[in-house]
Amino acid sequence: MPAVSKKQQKFFGIVRAIQKGEMAPTTPETAKAAADMEKDDVKKFASTKHKGLPEKKKIEEEIKTNRKISFPEMQQRIRDARERRRSQRKESEKLYIDTKRKGVKFYDKKGTGRLKDGKKVYD
C-alpha cells in the first residue's frame, strides 16, 4: 500500500514517528491514526518514495450543469413524479391491507407463516 501523494507520505511519516515514540502527537488526526493503525501498514505508507508522486491527489468531481428545460418538459416531469408517488402509495396501502387481513409474515426454522391474533399460523 504505497502512498498516493507526498502529503499522505508525510502524514504517515509523522504517524510512524509517533508510534516509535520519537515525537509527540501534533494533531488529533495523527494521534488517532497512530493509535488505530498497525505499525506495518504505517511503515508501508511512510516508506513510499516522493519521486513521481503528486503534491496532493486531485479529486475529480462531477459538476452538474444547470441546463434550462422547456415548460412542457417541466410539466411532464411533474406528471411523472405524481404518478410515481401515486403508485408508491397504492403499493403501500396494498401491503398494509394484506398485513391487517392475513397478519404479519414471519420466517423461522419450521417454515413461513403469519402471526394472527398473537398466534403463529403456518402456510
Image (spheres, helix red, strand yellow):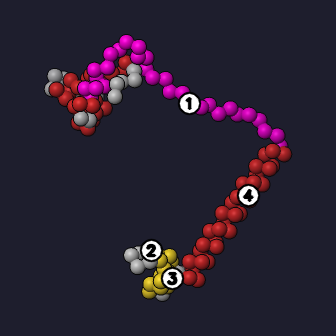
Which mark is nearer the camera, 4 or 3? Answer: 3
Residue type highlighted by circle 2: Tyr
| Residue at 28% from the left image edge and 20% from the top image edge | 47
Q: Position of residue 54 (x, y in %)?
A: 43, 17
Sequence-wise, the earlier of marks 1 and 2 is 1
Tell me the CA gap for discs 1 and 4: 31 Å
* N-term-proximal mark, 4 vs 3: 4
Q: Amino acid at mark 3?
A: Asp
Q: Which residue is mark 2?
A: 107
Say whether residue 115 is magenta.
Answer: no
Q: From this viewpoint, which residue is outermost toward the right? A: 72
For badge 1, the amino acid type reads Glu
Label 3 – label 2 distance at C-alpha: 11 Å
What residue is at 25 percent from the left and 26 percent from the top? 43
Residue for badge 1: 61
Q: In which quadrant is the N terminus drawn?
A: top left
Label 4 vs label 3: CA separation? 37 Å
Q: Earlier in the sequence, mark 1 or mark 3?
A: 1
60 shown above or below 86: above
- Dot 3 or dot 2, earlier in sequence: 2
Q: Which residue is identified by label 3?
A: 123
As drawn, is 89 to the left or to the right of 26? right
Mark 1 against mark 3, which lies toward the viewer? 3
Which residues are the magenta region?
42-71
Q: Classify residue 72 as left or right of residue 3.
A: right
- Any mark on residue 105, and which? none
- The crowding category of the residue bearing disc 1, from other C-alpha atoms within 10 Å (few below 14, some 14 to 19, many at least 20), is few
